[in-house]
Image (tube, rainbow, N blue to C red):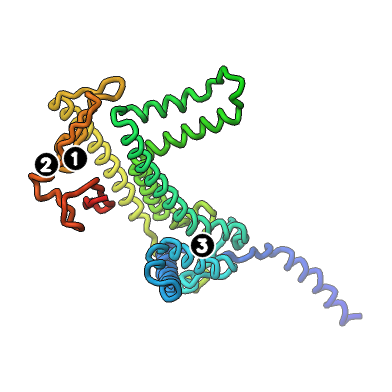
């Protein structure tokens, strides 16, 4: 009885001591720092480039160099998709993430991303840029063909864009004829809107590219401040990183780079605004000096070639083509590829002018 007494006395005291301690919280991994995320992204880009190069070599050996060059964008899409499907798509770390000891999480509780979220990230990373580039190039090509066909069919008409815009706005008016159905009216409205997009997209493309670059720079600025999303696809998919390696005492942060990038964005915005004002003033001075004022119908705008010479006058409705004279008198108007006088000169993205 005496031997059991101390044990009985010790039981409540030990239970009371254990109950007084707070419950242990689950250990969470710290968020990954900016240098680790950027180093992992550079490693992933390098390994994805290796996979793309291997796919390009395989296509070259199987189908020849001509096919490999013609489908180089599709081969790049295939290589990047294979790399991310074999790593992120299967729920594993990428080679860059494994090298930097970081892992993907999708919630505040540190849970790994679901398969649907991983597939969404892969689509944002690989397929969306490819589709955007292909659609943009197709629209530009169709716009060039449409403009050439309209100029050949109606050389005296210069207000086609205004007519298309007016047809877009007035296509909602119901027709008095009973034979026209609602489906045909809707089809005509969609067709007119598509023609208007084809007319305006070449002039809207530089602004769209500027908006995309601004979005990328803004996302990079927020990444330097908060250290969460280095790429826009990861921000859209909601995938973050945690550090699973050995804890370090000092982990560098890049907030100062975010401040510098914010200052750079402000300077670029002010510079772009200044250039737009200067270009509008210069165009006004050019119109005043040439004596051509734009009328409400869009006439009276001089058309210049790459040398600055007037090649047509839209006010009279007749094309006063003097390009042949200017090209014959100037040696700079020769094409550097065919070494002859440029016909239908076309500028590339790098700024060089060649024959179409």
Viewer-closest of 351 and 225: 351
Q: Quadrant of residue 301?
A: top left
Label disc, if present, on residue 326 of the rendered structure:
2
Determine which residue is flagged by label 3: 241
16 sits left or right of 209 in the view: right
Q: Please say if 233 is above or below 198.
A: below
Q: CA distance from mark 1 to mark 2?
A: 9 Å
Q: Quadrant of the N terminus?
A: bottom right
Instruction: State the separation of the CA atoms marked 3 and 2.
Output: 61 Å
Q: Residues within 10 Å of mark 2 (few under 14, many from 20)?
A: some
Q: Is residue 207 above or below residue 336?
A: above
- What residue sits 47% from the left and 53% below the top? 131
Q: Position of residue 206 (x, y in %)?
A: 33, 43
Q: Kindly tell me whether residue 141 is visible in this rendering.
A: yes
Pinpoint residue 264: horizontal percent, then vertical percent: 29, 48
Q: Nearer the viewer, mark 3 or mark 2?
A: 2
Is residue 108 placed above or below 46 in the rendered structure?
above
Q: CA distance from mark 3 to mark 1?
A: 53 Å
Percent position of residue 188, x then y: 52, 31
Q: Earlier in the sequence, mark 1 or mark 2?
A: 1
Query: Could you tell me if the residues under marks 1 and 2 are in contact, i.e. CB atoms within 8 Å?
Result: yes
- Compare residues 80 and 201 and report the one nearer the observer: 201
Helix or strand or loop: what does disc 1 sit on? loop
């Amino acid at each position: 009885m005496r031997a059991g007494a101390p044990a009985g006395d010790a039981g409540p005291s030990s239970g009371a001591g254990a109950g007084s301690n707070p419950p242990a919280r689950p250990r969470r991994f710290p968020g990954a720092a900016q240098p680790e995320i950027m180093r992992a992204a550079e490693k992933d880009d390098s390994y994805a480039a290796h996979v793309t190069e291997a796919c390009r070599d395989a296509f070259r050996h199987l189908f020849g160099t001509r096919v490999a060059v013609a489908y180089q964008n599709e081969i790049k899409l295939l290589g990047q998709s294979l790399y991310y499907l074999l790593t992120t798509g299967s729920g594993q770390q990428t080679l860059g993430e494994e090298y930097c000891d970081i892992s993907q999480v999708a919630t505040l509780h540190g849970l790994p991303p679901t398969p649907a979220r991983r597939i969404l990230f892969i689509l944002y990373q690989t397929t969306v840029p490819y589709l955007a580039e292909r659609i943009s190039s197709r629209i530009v090509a169709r716009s060039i063909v449409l403009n050439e066909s309209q100029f050949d069919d109606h050389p005296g008409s210069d207000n086609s864009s205004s007519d298309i815009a007016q047809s877009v706005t007035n296509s909602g008016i119901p027709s008095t004829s009973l034979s026209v159905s609602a489906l045909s009216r809707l089809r005509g409205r969609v067709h007119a809107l598509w023609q208007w997009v084809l007319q305006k997209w070449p002039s809207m493309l530089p602004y769209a590219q500027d908006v995309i670059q601004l979005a990328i720079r803004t996302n990079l600025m927020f990444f330097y401040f908060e250290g969460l999303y280095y790429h826009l696809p990861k921000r859209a998919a909601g995938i973050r990183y945690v550090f699973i390696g050995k804890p370090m005492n000092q982990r560098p942060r890049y907030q100062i780079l975010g401040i510098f990038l914010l200052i750079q964005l402000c300077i670029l915005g002010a510079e772009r605004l200044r250039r737009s004002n200067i270009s509008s003033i210069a165009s006004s001075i050019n119109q005043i000096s040439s004596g051509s004022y734009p009328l409400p119908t869009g006439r009276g705008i001089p058309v210049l070639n790459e040398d600055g010479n007037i090649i047509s006058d839209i006010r009279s409705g007749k094309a006063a083509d003097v390009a042949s004279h200017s090209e014959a008198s100037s040696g700079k108007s020769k094409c550097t590829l065919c070494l002859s006088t440029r016909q239908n000169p076309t500028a590339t993205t790098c700024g060089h002018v060649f024959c179409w």
